[in-house]
Amino acid sequence: MTNKIIEPIATEPVFVENYDLQSANTLAIPATAAYFCEVESRQQLVNALAFAEQKKIESLIVGEGSNLVFANDYQGLVIQNKLLGIHVLEQSVDEILIRVGAGENWHALVEYCVDHGWYGIENLALIPGLAGAAPIQNIGAYGAELKDVLVQLTYIDKASLETTQMSNANCEFAYRQSVFKQRLKNKGVIADLTLRLFPNAKPSLSYPALRDQLPNDASPKQVFDAVCKLRQAKLPAPSQIPNAGSFFKNPIVSSTQLGKLKEQFPGLVSFAFEGDHKIAAAWLIDHRGWKSKSIKGVGVHQDQALVLVNPRRAKGSDVLGFARQIQDDVQNSFGIWLEIEPIVIG
Ligand SMILES: Cc1cc2nc3c(=O)[nH]c(=O)nc-3n(C[C@H](O)[C@H](O)[C@H](O)COP(=O)(O)OP(=O)(O)OC[C@H]3O[C@@H](n4cnc5c(N)ncnc54)[C@H](O)[C@@H]3O)c2cc1C
């Protein structure tokens, strides 16, 4: 019998020049990065950041590229996150604390927790991407958000290379929003997340489509299966037709603004949201007749007006140009500016 030799992870990442990013973003935008590397350990990550510093170029950490629009070629270093590991930190009859490496696939993590009977993230099944990107826009779906379960995260500052623990409150979470899209935009890297999950919690069934089909005491597995089914029926898979999910955020308006809009547009779809109202951006886009329209190969999905599709792999400027036409049209028709949800690079 021979002993298996486990190779230590090299401390220096392998840097590739002029890297093709088309398969690194789910919109399949053809763009290149001046440099690219993968990081499997914190040491590799720190060395990658130091490489960028030494070359005096920017760096961009990416997961699965499911929320990215490359407007141009990227002149810096793209770092592919591969920091893995799921560890139970504490477990009692009431709760479980787990630490998750930022490079873990989000959906696989949800499935892992569901398999263990832990409530908390089952409503967030099938959201593409890696765990490390989840705090950036406080991922949310079917009445749940990451902020409901995140205890803290490990954050590495790019400039100082200092590692800190950031609490949930310090992440300044809001609807598709966090400090990482504002004051700390592209300033650091999230290395891991600590989540609080529950063995006995009540399922979160505030979303009507879930409430209608599940019992009040549905198990995490039942919620997970229902969410997966709903998402598979509604959303186009990027592997079949390149897209970045919802391209625009649902605008939030006051009761007064909503009242005025409803006088003019009685069919307008809206939802109560934290004292205000979320307007269904899909309704605005659909009402203006954009569904199924396309320009220069970029289009609005035939069933989902919020999803822009890029079947001909058009460049980022064409995707953003098309989005701009929709934004201008909605602004002129309803007086509402639609904000782009994905992160635009360059
Ligand atoms: C079909 C489809 C459906 C979707 N549905 C939803 C949905 O229901 N709800 C929802 O909220 N989102 C949804 N999204 C958007 C997307 O899944 C999430 O935003 C996801 O968190 C992005 O993960 P990613 O690994 O692909 O990140 P990327 O697209 O690679 O990166 C996104 C941003 O995060 C930054 N980032 C990534 N990793 C790190 C890190 N470790 N540290 C610091 N910064 C980092 C990147 O620099 C970039 O700015 C959907 C996307 C698609 C394509």
Image (tube, rainbow, N blue to C red):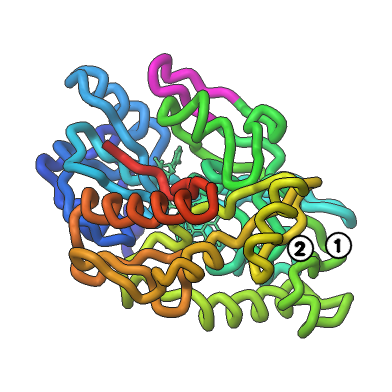
197 and 77: which one is in front? 77
Residue 205 visible? The answer is yes
Location of residue 165 with respect to 323 vertically, above or below: above
Given the image, on which type of amino acid does mark 2 rest?
Tyr
Q: Are marks 2 and 1 in contact (CB under 8 Å)?
A: yes
Q: Is residue 75 left or right of residue 228?
A: left
Assign a secondary structure to mark 2.
Answer: loop
Q: Position of residue 291 (x, y in %)?
A: 41, 73
Q: Position of residue 266 (x, y in %)?
A: 68, 68
229 and 224: which one is in front? 229
Q: Position of residue 118 (x, y in %)?
A: 75, 63
- Residue at 25 percent across and 61 percent down: it is 28
- Residue at 17 percent across and 49 percent down: it is 31
Q: Quick one: quadrant of the C terminus?
A: top left
Question: For residue 289, which quarter of the picture?
Answer: bottom left
Given the image, on which type of amino acid does mark 1 rest?
Ala
Badge 2 density bin: few <14, some 14–19, many ≥20, Cα 10 Å: many
Question: In the image, which residues are magenta?
Answer: 155-164
Residue 201, labelled with which disc? 1
290 and 173: which one is in front? 290
Q: Quick one: quadrant of the N terminus?
A: bottom left
Question: For residue 119, which quarter of the picture?
Answer: bottom right
**Earlier along the polypeptide chain: callout 2 or callout 1?**
2
- Residue at 46 percent across and 69 percent down: it is 305
Residue 56, labelled with which disc? none
The residue at the far left in this view is: 18
Residue 237 visible? The answer is no
- Is the residue marked 2 within 8 Å of ligand 1, measured from its CB? no
- Which residue is labeled 2 in the image? 119
